[in-house]
Amino acid sequence: MRIAIIGAGAIGGVFAWYLAPHCDLVIVDQWADHVAALNRDGLHCERDGVTKARRVRAVSDPALAFPAQLALVLVKAHQTTWAAEACAAALAPDGLAYTLQNGLGNHEVLAAELGATRVGQGVTTLGGTLLGPGRVRHAGMGATTLSLTPNSAQANALADLLNQAGLPTSITGDLDTLIWGKLIVNVGINAITALLRVRNGVLAENSAARSLLGAVVTEAVGVAAAQGITLPYTDTVAHVLQVARATAANQSSMLQDRLRGAPTEIATINGAIVALGAKLGIPTPYNATLVALITALETSQGEGG
Ligand SMILES: NC(=O)C1=CN([C@@H]2O[C@H](COP(=O)(O)OP(=O)(O)OC[C@H]3O[C@@H](n4cnc5c(N)ncnc54)[C@H](OP(=O)(O)O)[C@@H]3O)[C@@H](O)[C@H]2O)C=CC1
Ligand SMILES: CC(C)(CO)C(=O)C(=O)O
């Protein structure tokens, strides 16, 4: 089976490293130095202090990945429009794209380009860090869950392949619970750690940060409830704090973006809560404030910010 990894940053790189010996894998990435290093030296993955390299094929032109049966979309949200076009060029006419990105709205961008019957969705709790061109760190093994839709046979084939490659994967028919379960963790942790410039564990230890996290998460729970979405845990704030403790030493992905001056995924995380809240008539002032602060930081670069 030919699989295209669209975006081999931190998490795309980890998926690529595990999948490489198990399928005909092609990495599609816009970062020319990364593509060159991958083709020249292989993909280096560090785990628990040990680094191993695997041979991979990487391309900048998505048409060179054609005809892929499956594309795993693992770019940051601001690159999803590019990823949708890359999928259209890389996929065989009956090929499917699966997005495992965080946040809301990426599925819709892909579906607008490919058609909803060619886009699946999932979440992953794997942890990854991009170390440099051709180099990633696998920061933690986690579960990946894929939607049964739009094609159960393809979903099962992909899950089998990922399990065979050593990445624990299951399938769900309840996509909303899956997506919102992960979204609310990111809503509670990412923007606050990025603003405070702290690792995740601080949110559980510091009482002021903890109560801010509680307020932000409670708004998101209200937005989920208003849509009839069942969350996968009963005490949502306690769950998010537990994730902050479990990933205490991590720099959240939004903090990492801020530290390297890259665009964040604020619009598809806290911004999605604000947009849906406005549509449903639910006030979300804490989330709106986080969106405004992160947006101000992003747009003040070069202005003494
Ligand atoms: N990292 C994680 O542990 C997890 C991430 N996710 C989600 O997966 C998706 C992808 O995230 P992630 O893999 O973290 O993204 P990364 O920030 O690691 O990489 C995304 C892209 O950023 C560009 N890039 C990164 N570093 C550099 C650099 N130093 N110089 C130039 N370009 C650079 C590359 O884009 P380009 O090719 O355009 O240059 C790269 O493909 C997101 O939706 C994220 O929320 C989900 C679960 C866990
Ligand atoms: C779970 C968490 C918060 C881990 O850092 C994450 O998904 C992220 O940083 O985006």
Image (cartoon, rainbow, N blue to C red):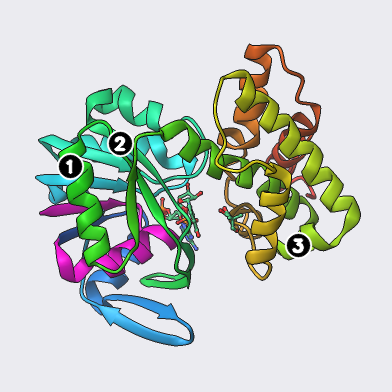
Residue 204 sits in quarter:
bottom right
Give the residue pinned by disc 3. Answer: 198
What's the amino acid at mark 1?
Answer: Gln
**Residue 269, x across and y down, in percent:** 60, 37
Cα–Cα gap, marks 2 and 3 = 34 Å
Q: Is residue 82 left or right of residue 184?
A: left
- Residue 24 magenta-drawn? no
**Residue 76, x across and y down, in percent:** 47, 46
* Ligand 1 closer than 8 Å to label 2 CB: no
First of labels 1, 2 by sequence position: 2
Q: Is residue 133 left or right of residue 19?
A: right
Which residue is located at x 20 percent, y 37 percent?
152
What's the amino acid at mark 2?
Answer: Gly
Which residue is located at x 59 percent, y 29 percent?
272
Q: Is residue 142 above or below residue 146?
A: below
- How crowded pointer 3 is (Cα within 10 Å; few <14, some 14-19, many 20+) is rated as some
- How crowded pointer 2 is (Cα within 10 Å; few <14, some 14-19, many 20+) is rated as many
- How crowded pointer 1 is (Cα within 10 Å; few <14, some 14-19, many 20+) is rated as some
Report if the CB atoms under discs 1 and 2 are less than 8 Å apart.
yes
**Residue 125, x across and y down, in percent:** 48, 56
Give the residue pinned by disc 1. Answer: 154
Residue 121 sits in quarter:
top left
Q: Is residue 170 above or below residue 50?
A: above
Which mark, by number, is residue 120?
2
Q: Which residues are magenta?
A: 1-23
Marks 1 and 3: which is nearer the front?
Answer: 1
Which mark, by number, is residue 243?
none
Residue 212 sits in quarter:
top right
What's the amino acid at mark 3?
Answer: Val
The secondary structure type at the circle numbered 1 is helix
Q: Quadrant of ligand 2?
A: bottom right
